Image (cartoon, rainbow, N blue to C red):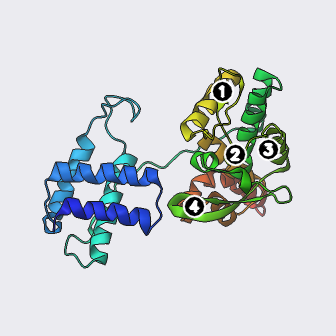
Amino acid sequence: MDLSRLVQEYLEDLQIEKGRSRLTIVKYDLYLRRFLDWTHCASPADITQDIIRRFRLRLAQKIINHPGKGKVGEALSRGCQNGHLIAVRGFLRYLTKRDIASLAPDKIDLARVPERSVNFLDAEELENLLNAPFQKFGQKPLAVRDNAILEMLFSTGLRVSELANLQKGQIHNRSDEISVRGKGGKTRVVFISSRARTALQKYLLLRNDDCPLLFIRWDKGRGTLNKTQKALSSRSIERLVKSYVAYCGLGKKITPHTLRHSFATDLLQNGADLRSVQALLGHSSIMTTQIYTHVTDQHLADIHKAFHSKRRKK
């Protein structure tokens, strides 16, 4: 069977049956086309462990040469290399499901990656960032919108793409809960704090349009919110956060995901358990949530100090 055609059918399956996002489909398409181009496999039977080994070697040697895809001149990160392997492994699972003979998916092991470090904001940094729109623009509509965005990111722990896709109809006056669709099409409930609720209400009072999108673009020419149903993109929100970080002079790299980290860290520091944080973040595996165990380290240190060697003479 033609491998290129099978890849296309797999991508269609991801979209229709699995409900994967457009971004995921585009990424998997890139990774699998790259696999076909580099390995010259024409049929499922051509995929062998030796082919995978050579593909991994090529990934390790690939140098970034496109601005925006990483630092030009650097090699692909381990995480990006694993992304390619995950796409190939998923494709092999699809072939197995269709009883098409090829390499077993479990023959592909992922590369070890360095343990992720978590960057989060302390209380003072957080307040400075959340108040930055008003400090910079006063009470202008742009400041009201941007403050609502920042408060929502910290209050809910939403991914930036999840925030960008929110609609006005998801915000209810009598409920502090929002049902959102996250990675892999999975739905979860997130909660709005009283501060975020106030910020949202203030922002929605400025909206007298029929556009269903929650956060819309700012029309620089007119100095008003753009009411032509143009959503504020994930990239725009990233630039927005970056601009306020620079305005505050925080002196470190902070992205919308930093506010997600800060959300999780805040919960754990105030006594939440890891399983609950996992559910609120929408992590499929508790292993992903365990990157926040640094937060509980101080708690363990306090326990050690309070209870260890109490019976020994000083």
Disc nearer the start of the sequence (4/1): 1
Q: Is residue 298 visible?
A: no
Q: Earlier in the sequence, mark 2 or mark 3?
A: 3
Q: Nearer the viewer, mark 2 or mark 3?
A: 2
Residue 25, x across and y down, in percent? 40, 54
Comes first in the chain, label 3 or label 1: 3
Q: Do labels 2 and 4 touch, CB within 8 Å?
A: no
Sequence-wise first label, 2 or 1 = 2
Residue at the disc numbered 4: 283
Q: Amino acid at mark 2?
A: Leu
Tag in front: 4 or 1: 1
Up the image or down, 283 lies above or below 206; here it is: below
Q: Amino acid at mark 3?
A: Leu
Q: Which residue is mark 1?
A: 219
In the picture, measured across the screen, residue 234 lies left or right of residue 168, that is left
Which residue is at a point 81% across and 41% down the rendered structure image?
A: 199
Q: How many residues crowd around disc 1 within 10 Å: few (fewer than 14), some, or many (20 or more)?
A: few
Q: Which mark is residue 200?
A: 3
